[in-house]
């Protein structure tokens, strides 16, 4: 479903919030288009869980790591559903359905074969526009083989690549995490 130019961001979000979507599916808004995807596959979730587990020892007590939350990026007409988000735990009185992107410190996407383009192009542009400091893309379907790439230093709608690791190599996340993730734990496909 695409956004009507006459329709406001608030109307689009209200529609997204109030619609009865298929149970278990991920429903987001990418560049003004409502997208419905099936739930991630088991191996996809194994990777996300492995990454999530590493963060518990390095996060401040008042931060959380949240699985598949909605992140609002109104300037990109986006309500994105990343696999993981690290953000301070706060009482978000603005909305019960989503986290304002400005609160996120790190977003993690694990590609699925069906929507890898969104994770590589549309979502990173929105995350950079929102000023999210770090974006970790775990790309199981990369053309040159599975990789994990850390992006940072957002400027406009672009993050700068900070480091890339092929599956089997470690990837280091900078402060405030100072964390090494061992990608050898990730199932490749």
Image: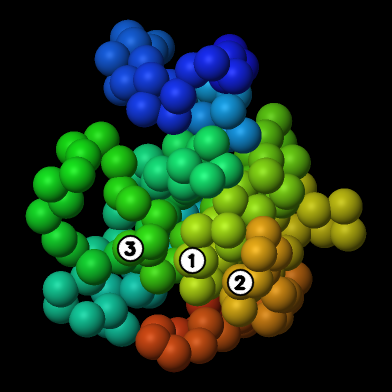
The quarter holding residue 54 reads bottom left
How many numbered badges does the structure rendering display? Answer: 3
Q: Which residue is drawn at 74% across and 41% down?
A: 117
Q: Which residue is drawn at 16% across and 51% down?
A: 92
The CA span between labels 2 and 1 is 7 Å
Residue 135, visible in the rendered structure: yes
According to the picture, the residue beneath numbered tag 3 turns out to be: 103
Residue 176, image x and y in percent? Answer: 39, 87
According to the picture, the residue beneath numbered tag 2 turns out to be: 154
**Sooner in the amino-acid sequence: mark 3 or mark 2:** 3
Secondary structure found at label 1: loop
Which numbered marker is on residue 58? Answer: none
* Residue placed most toward the observer, 11 or 152: 11
| Left or right for 67, reference 178 | left
**Circles 2 and 1: CB distance less than 8 Å?**
yes
**Sooner in the amino-acid sequence: mark 3 or mark 1:** 3
Above or below 75: residue 175:
below
The CA span between labels 3 and 2 is 15 Å
Disc 2 packing (10 Å; few <14; some 14–19; many ≥20):
many
Above or below 157: residue 63:
below
- Residue placed furthest toward the right: 144
Residue 167, image x and y in percent? Answer: 70, 68
According to the picture, the residue beneath numbered tag 1 turns out to be: 132
Disc 3 packing (10 Å; few <14; some 14–19; many ≥20):
some
Residue 8, image x and y in percent? Answer: 45, 24
Secondary structure found at label 3: helix
**Which quarter of the figure is the N terminus placed in?**
top right
Disc 1 packing (10 Å; few <14; some 14–19; many ≥20):
many
Secondary structure found at label 2: strand
Residue 40, visible in the rendered structure: no
């Amino acid at each position: 479903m695409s956004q009507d130019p006459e329709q406001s961001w608030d109307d689009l979000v209200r529609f997204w919030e109030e619609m009865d979507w298929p149970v278990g599916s991920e429903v987001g808004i990418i560049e003004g288009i409502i997208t419905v995807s099936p739930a991630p596959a088991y191996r996809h979730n194994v990777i996300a869980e492995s990454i999530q587990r590493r963060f518990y020892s390095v996060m401040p007590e008042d931060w959380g790591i949240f699985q598949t939350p909605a992140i609002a990026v109104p300037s990109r007409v986006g309500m994105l559903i990343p696999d993981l988000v690290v953000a301070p735990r706060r009482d978000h009185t603005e909305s019960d359905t989503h986290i304002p992107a400005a609160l996120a410190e790190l977003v993690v996407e694990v590609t699925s074969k069906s929507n890898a383009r969104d994770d590589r192009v549309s979502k990173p542009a929105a995350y950079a526009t929102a000023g999210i400091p770090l974006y970790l893309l775990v790309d199981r379907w990369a053309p040159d083989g599975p990789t994990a790439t850390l992006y940072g230093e957002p400027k406009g709608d672009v993050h700068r690549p900070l480091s890339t690791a092929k599956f089997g190599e470690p990837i280091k996340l900078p402060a405030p995490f100072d964390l090494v993730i061992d990608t050898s734990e990730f199932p490749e496909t």
